[in-house]
Image (cartoon, grey):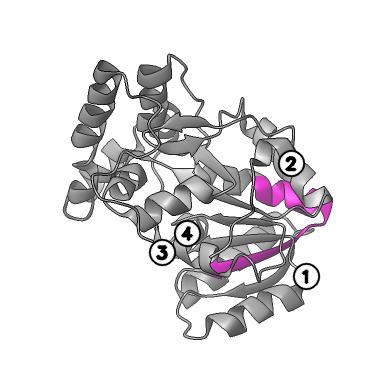
Amino acid sequence: MLIAEGDVSVRTPCIPRAINVAGVPVVPFESYEHALACIEATVAAREKTFWVAINPQKCFRAWHEGGLLDLLNRADVGICDGVGVSIAARILHGQGIKRCTGCDLFLRIVPHAAKKGWGVFLLGASPESNAEACAKLQEAYPDLRIVGHQDGYFKDSAQVVSHINSSGADLLFVAMGSPTQEYWIAEHREKINAPFCMGVGGSFDVVSGTIRRAPAIFRRTGTEWLFQLVTEPHKRFRRQTVYVPFMLRVLSKRLVGSVGASQWTTKPARQ
């Protein structure tokens, strides 16, 4: 598993230095436009980067899964996907981080890619959702170059990587659910030629209309979790229960003065 070595903020100066939030580095972008400008710089330089969306659920799981914690620390850019991460940053460092969710960033990258002529590859989701997402994005942005797509139900990863590379893709979006998508990207990043790779969770399902996204008021206030809990209680309840232990751990770290600790997990990282 190879992820670009060194601090990406040094290789790409427009990317701010990451802040340690709950043991995971998160980049404090000023806005979505700021993040887009940084993506443009990395694509222009043909600099390989792996971007990861960071939320409380992912942090909580990483505390108990050494391999995931290592992956998140080695990824090039972690974006503030959840309001809980922003609140944690303020508690730990007195500096809130503006949200930059994976789905919203994806939906902003696509029209930008159409303008720039970047080749986009969509990997993941069901065959129907993947195909419908491609069709709807192409309809919305006629100049968008979708150079390849593949649903998430495949057995030969090497063949998929070869397909991605032969397509000449500049951007690879992987929708396999988290953290499966992050593990897949990390495992194959060295062989993938596309400069930009990011896991986008259920974004293809949102675009295709397979799942309903939270209304704008919930997205603006960072309370999508509440909408999801109310509309899909049986599916979402277990995921949402991590917020309490997440915040308790953050508060305890603030109280004992170990906010900068890189290892928040109670289990040793896998070798």
Of residue 263 and residue 134, the one placed in the foreground of this image is 263
The kind of residue tagged 1 is: Gly
Left/right of residue 123 with respect to residue 234 in the rendered view: right
Q: Residue at x 68, y 31 (%)?
A: 34
Magenta residues, as a range?
109-123
Q: Could you classify mark 2 by the number of other residues whose Cα lies within 10 Å: few (under 14), some (14-19), or many (20 or more)? A: few
Give the alpha-carbon distance from disc 1 to disc 3, as whole Å. 24 Å
SS for callout 2:
helix
Give the alpha-carbon distance from disc 2 to disc 4, as whole Å. 22 Å
Instruction: Give the residue at mark 1.
Output: 168
Tell me which label, 1 or 2, sits earlier in the chain.
2
Q: Residue at x 68, y 34 (%)?
A: 15
Give the alpha-carbon distance from disc 4 to disc 1, as whole Å. 21 Å
Q: Nearer the viewer, mark 4 or mark 1?
A: 4
Tell me which label, 4 or 1, sits earlier in the chain.
1
SS for callout 3:
helix
Residue 237 numbered tag: none
Q: Residue at x 70, y 55 (%)?
A: 48
Of residue 196 and residue 254, the one placed in the foreground of this image is 254
Of residue 246 and residue 173, the one placed in the foreground of this image is 246
Instruction: Give the residue at mark 4.
Output: 182
Instruction: Give the residue at mark 2.
Output: 11
Say if 114 sits above or below 122 in the image.
Answer: above
- The answer to whether marks 3 and 4 mark residues whose Cβ atoms lie closer than 8 Å is yes
Quarter of the rendering occupied by the C terminus: bottom left
Tell me which label, 1 or 3, sits earlier in the chain.
1
Q: Residue at x 54, y 64 (%)?
A: 185
